[in-house]
């Protein structure tokens, strides 16, 4: 049973560029949440998607946007990249609630 | 807003010994969940143990157990018979239906296991 799959695993971008990160949830899960984990910190909630809509959003600027597709997969887009956006981006999927909340291995984004 | 505090940035333990990681949280909700996650160098967050706030009995998973003190808002993790594979970052996390099932994490505790 495939767990949560994220791509790519590593990414290097230049300041001002745009990036798209992808997440395929665990089979049977319908909710996808995105987290940003800066070096040496705990993950910070970015937003959550359920039924193709953003259900909740954390304290992140509008440069961070997302999408959920009918097959429950999700994308995280970040525009006008800043050096401070360098972090590990984690995707987690669940079945509506917190039961079975499963994380992927993340995408390491480096902005230079 | 809910907050989670882990006051021990680093801990170390001898192999086969017992170690306890501390976590406190702040919330005004009465129904919530608490979690301990392990993050090895592979980066994936692995669920170690979860506790529902309405359950008085402390959760146990093999060598891992928690001491949940709801009134004190404390949630510590005890690892018994520590193994080299237990070495990792450990994060305490809070979640609830009132927060639409997002998780709020502490800053983590780096656990080193010495042979």
Image: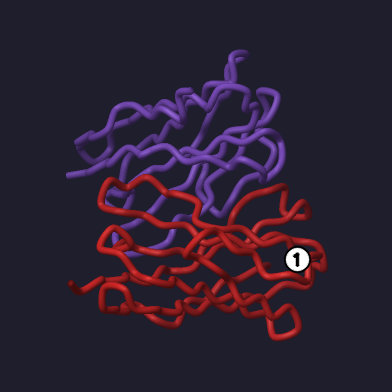
x and y percentages locating residue B15 in the rendered image: 26, 73
| Residue at image point 62% right, 46% down | A57
Q: Determine whether B75 is above or below A44 in the image.
A: below
Coloring applied to the structure: by chain
The crowd level at tag 1 (other Cα within 10 Å; few <14, some 14-19, many 20+) is some
Tell me the quarter of the image containing the C terminus of chain B. bottom left
Tell me the quarter of the image containing the N terminus of chain B. bottom right
**Numbered circles on residues, count:** 1
Chain identifier, red in the render: B
Q: Which residue is mark 1?
A: B53
| Residue at image point 76% right, 83% down | B71
**A17 left or right of B98 in image:** left
- Front residue (pair A21, A64): A21
Q: Colour of chain A?
A: purple
**A66 left or right of A110 in image:** right
SS category of the residue bearing label 1: loop
Displayed quadrant of residue B104: bottom right
x and y percentages locating residue A110 in the rendered image: 22, 43
């Amino acid at each position: 049973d495939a767990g949560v799959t994220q791509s790519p695993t590593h990414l290097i971008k230049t300041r001002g560029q745009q990036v798209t990160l992808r997440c395929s949830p665990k089979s049977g899960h319908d909710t996808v949440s995105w987290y940003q984990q800066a070096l040496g910190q705990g993950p910070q909630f970015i937003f959550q998607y359920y039924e193709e809509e953003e259900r909740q959003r954390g304290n992140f600027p509008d440069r961070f946007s997302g999408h959920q597709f009918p097959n429950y997969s999700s994308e995280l887009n970040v525009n006008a990249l800043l050096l401070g956006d360098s972090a590990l981006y984690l995707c987690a999927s669940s079945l509506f609630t917190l039961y079975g909340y499963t994380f992927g291995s993340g995408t390491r984004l480096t902005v230079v | 807003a809910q907050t989670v505090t882990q006051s021990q940035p680093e801990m170390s333990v001898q192999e086969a010994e017992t170690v306890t990681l501390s976590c406190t949280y702040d919330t005004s909700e009465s129904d919530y969940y608490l979690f301990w996650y392990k993050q090895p160098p592979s980066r994936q967050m692995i669920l170690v143990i979860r506790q529902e706030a309405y359950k008085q009995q402390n959760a146990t998973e093999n060598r891992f157990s928690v001491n949940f003190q709801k009134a004190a808002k404390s949630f510590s993790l005890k690892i018994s018979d520590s193994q080299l594979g237990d070495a990792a970052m450990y994060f305490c996390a809070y979640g609830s239906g009132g927060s639409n099932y997002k998780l709020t994490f502490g800053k983590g505790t780096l656990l080193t296991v010495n042979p």
